[in-house]
Image: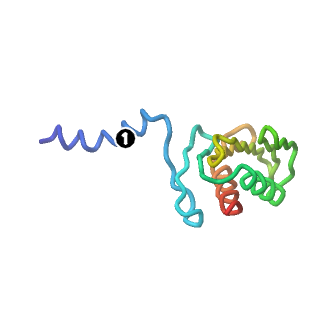
Amino acid sequence: MRKTVVFYFLVPFLLLNISGCAPLIIGAAAGGLGACAINRDTIQSEMDKSYNSLWNAALTVSRIRGTIKQEDSTRGCIELKTDSSRVWIKVIRLTRATTRLRVSARKHHLPNLELAQDIFVKIMEEAK
């Protein structure tokens, strides 16, 4: 009996650790968007939005939040300086209908996952 109880409690934790990706539910305003923290400073998700829609939303949010240091629409990269943090936004076209959005943030060379989540949600809201 005790083995089955321990088994049922440990299996979900082991599956999350094995998958290599901790799923996050980000923002009620974003419709409970499921995103994945791929490391300590990066949030990413694949979605059924056009590349142009996400790129324009990322530019708009970047201009509002801080100073754009570098942007390249062909590579889908934006480097942003906001407050004392640096943010990197990457928009990647996977198929005609599917696009990946990746947002990384660091403050004084340390991960800033909260800022990455905030900018990620703002981009998703803007892209609607």
Residue at the limit of the structure toward the front, as seen here: 96
User: In the rendered view, would you say 125 is above or below 111?
Assistant: below
- Residue 40 placement (x, y as % from top left): 60, 39
In which quarter of the view is residue 71 placed? top right
Q: How is the image coloured?
A: rainbow
Residue 36 position in % (x across, y down): 55, 45
**x and y percentages locating residue 111 in the rendered image:** 66, 41
Residue most extreme to the bottom: 29
Looking at the rendered structure, the number of numbered marks drawn on it comes to 1
Residue at the spot 70% in from the left edge and 60% down from the top edge: 127
Q: From the viewer's perspective, tell me whether residue 67 is left or right of residue 85.
A: right
Q: Position of residue 47 (x, y in %)?
A: 60, 50
Location of residue 79 (image quadrant): top right
Q: Quadrant of residue 10?
A: top left
Quadrant including the C terminus: bottom right
Q: Residues within 10 Å of mark 1 (few under 14, many from 20)?
A: few
- Quadrant that contains the N terminus: top left
- In the image, what residue type sits under mark 1? Phe
**Residue in the image at 75% along x and 57% along y:** 57
Camera-nearest residue between 108 and 119: 119
- Residue 120 versus residue 1 in the image, above or below: below
The residue labelled by disc 1 is 13
**Horizontal relation, residue 64 to residue 121: left or right:** right
Position of 55 with respect to 33 (left or right) is: right
Comparing 10 with 121, the one in front is 121
Residue drawn at 83 percent across, 55 percent down: 66
State the SS at label 1: helix
